[in-house]
Image (spheres, rainbow, N blue to C red):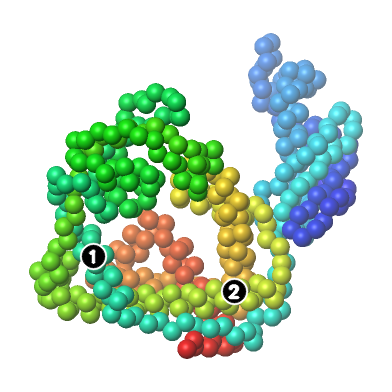
Amino acid sequence: MEIQITTKKSGGVERLLAVTVPADEVKAVENTTARRYASSVRLPGFRPGKAPPDLVRKRYKDAIRQEVIERVVQEAYKQVLDTENLKVAAQPHIHDLKFNDGEPMTFELHLEVRPEIDLSKIEGFTVTRTAPAVNDTAVDEQIEQLRDQRASWAPVLERPLPGDMVTVLLATAEEGGEIPEGREYTIVLGGGQAIPGIEELVMEMAPSETKEQGVRWPDDFPDETQRGKTKPVRVVLQEVKRKSLPALDDAFAREVGDFDSLETLRTTVRKDLEEHAVREADAGVRAQLIEQIAAANTFEVPPSWVNQMIQAYLEVYQVPEDERDRFLAEFQPVAERQVRRDLIIDTIAEREHLAASEADVDDRVAEVAQKRGAEPGQVYASLQKAGRLKEIERSITEDKVFGWLLERNTVEQAN
């Protein structure tokens, strides 16, 4: 197919191309399509495939026209990619398509292409590794979290204190309005679940008591229209529960897991925290390296890839519809950095032949199986069913790329 391609816009990863398909090329596709219809359709008074072509064209004009458009555009698109040597990043868009009998078909092709990434400078950088340090305070805090998870809640007949769990019937109205029926809420006081004015009101009450009074909404309330307003509030304090932490002894350690004593638990917690600190330090080194490489090797990223990542996070975090605009604005630069990071890693992996192999994946699965005390084949099948093999492959590739980078850049230990 002989087509004419005119570049209307070419900047970064964006291309806008005007495509013209000659009338005779379009006619040839139209004739082929019409003959195929004529050989297969059934019209009253004619045997299958024996209806006059002109009658078939007239009867199936719209269907033939639509199929011709789709076939011509598809063939022209393939030819554009080959002629212009384009590697597309996302599904292209067709604009301003014109198709009249006996005339050329014209349309505009708007697409994003994969960025050309040179990465001319990826060596000679210096990054700082923060020394992981786990002190007794960090261990104590982790132990306290474990105690908190196993705390019991018992009803009390006293006024609630910060940290208590209360069940209330709560109702508010606009200033001067009638207070409606209340809704039941369970609130841990001091946890930021309710505005301070309501928490203060609750802590002035005894169980089974009801109070009505004006409460001022804080100046930093998320809904700007409600900031600083004073509204009538009715609270019925139905129940107060106070937390009771388990004793910190060997029995608690045995309840948490397979630990003989509290000292064994503390030793394990310290080891876990130290391993986590090492992982965090390694992640910090990787992040610094990517930031410096990205700053030294500028390139555009396809907006469609950034949008895909944002949409994925919207689904993962189940962002409410009324908060999506704010989320999009805040997460846009984060998503762009992530896409840029992935492109840098992919480019180095391809250029230096560092991509994970099947053998690498098999070895990693065998490691996982050994830790689980399971057969590698069973673990592989389980990971494959859960769709996690790609995740493992990606992790191995990243480890290889960063290992390669660390050999060529300097890591200084922080004091």
Q: Amino acid at mark 2?
A: Ile
At mark 2, the secondary structure is helix
Question: Dot 2: within a 10 Å radius of its alpha carbon, few (fewer than 14), some, or many (20 or more) residues?
Answer: many
Reading the image, the residue beneath label 2 is 290
Q: Nearer the viewer, residue 289 or 173?
A: 173
Q: Is residue 413 left or right of residue 84?
A: left
Q: Residue 167 in the image: x percent, y percent?
A: 24, 40
Residue furthest left as drawn: 251
Q: Residue 127 in the image: x percent, y percent?
A: 56, 83
User: In which quarter of the view is residue 209 placed?
Assistant: top left
Reading the image, the residue beneath label 1 is 146
Q: Is residue 294 left or right of residue 319?
A: right
The residue positioned 43% from the left and 24% from the top of the image is 177
The residue positioned 77% from the left and 60% from the top of the image is 12
On screen, 324 above or below 389? above
Q: Amino acid at mark 1?
A: Leu
Q: Is residue 274 left or right of residue 249?
A: right
Q: Residue 85 in the image: x percent, y percent?
A: 77, 60
Residue 254 visible somewhere in the drawing: no
